Structure formats: C-alpha cells, structure tokens
Amino acid sequence: MRALVTGGTGRIGVAITARLEDTGWSVLAAGRADGDVARPDVARTLVDRAAAELGGIDLLVNGAAEGFAPKSALELTEADWDLAFGATAKGSFFVPQAAAPHLRESGGTVVMIGETFTSVAFGHIEGTPRMNVTSPATGALISPVFRPT
C-alpha cells in the first residue's frame, strides 16, 4: 500500500506517517520544503512525484495547514489570512484534485485532516479578541466542497 501524507513533517503528520510505515505502508511524507500546495502546479508536481516514487497512490492523507497559532484579531494581517487559506483551503482542494486519477486507478481514498475548532474561531483570551485563522479556512473548505448529496 502506498500513501502520500501532506503535512507529513508536522506534529500530527509525523505520527500518521510512522503509524502507516509501522503497518507496512510505503509513504511519502511531504512538508513545507516540498513547496506551496496552494499552487495547483506545485500540488500536481508533488502528487506526480509521489506516484512515481511509490509506484502509485492508494491513500492521500491531506493534512497540510497553516495558521494554528492564535493571534490578536487586531494584529492579524492579510498575509496571515492568505497563508492559512492557502495551505488549508486551497491546498486541501488542489492536492486531492491532482491525486484523483491515481486514486481512481487504485481504488484509493482521501483522508482529510482538519481541526474541530471551526465554529469557535473568535474567542476572548485575557480580554483580547483572538483568532485562529485555520478555523475559518477549514470551514471554507468543508462547507462548499464536501457537502453531502
């Protein structure tokens, strides 16, 4: 069995990669050094590399994300927002899109890793409005893309 794990060099991704490898999977663990998966061309290149190195793809664990550190809502910049929406929302669309032909061929699947804090994106910590930008980015992905039919 062959897996591509985006976010595979981060805290959760390392654990997922190790577990897959412990159970006999061949894994390509991709991280920031592998490029910005918010860009469709980079997503395609990463997926093509994984398919070539692994001999195909049976599983995509899509865990690449940015923006986990809560920040004062008053200090949040457009760059913070763009970074979170890039890896979290755009990357979570473009990587599975690129992997779809490989997964269709193998009968494989996609596992989306996201946070569960989306509904509580704004909060008050020590009287200062705080925001975790990954929360709305995850919400942006789940709401329009993965709506049950």
Image (tube, rainbow, N blue to C red):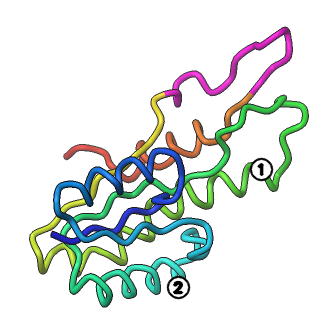
Q: Give the range drawn in magenta.
A: 117-130
Q: State the image quarter where residue 52 is shown.
A: bottom left
Q: Name the residue under label 2.
A: 41
Is the residue 84 above or below the residue 39 in the image? above
| Farthest residue, direction right | 75
Q: Distance between the residues labelled 2 and 1?
A: 22 Å
Left or right: 59, with 61 as reference point: left
Left or right: 14, with 90 as reference point: left
Is the residue 64 above or below the residue 70 in the image? below
Which quadrant of the rendered structure holds the N terminus? Answer: bottom left
Q: Which of 12 and 66 is in front in this view?
A: 12
Q: Residues within 10 Å of mark 2 (few under 14, many from 20)?
A: some
Q: Nearer the viewer, residue 54 or 83?
A: 54
Give amino acid for label 1: Asp
Q: Which of 73 and 20 is in front in this view?
A: 20
Query: Looking at the image, which residue is at 58% across and 22% down?
Result: 120
Q: Name the residue under label 1.
A: 80
* SS of the residue under disc 2: helix
Q: Any mark on residue 67, and which?
A: none
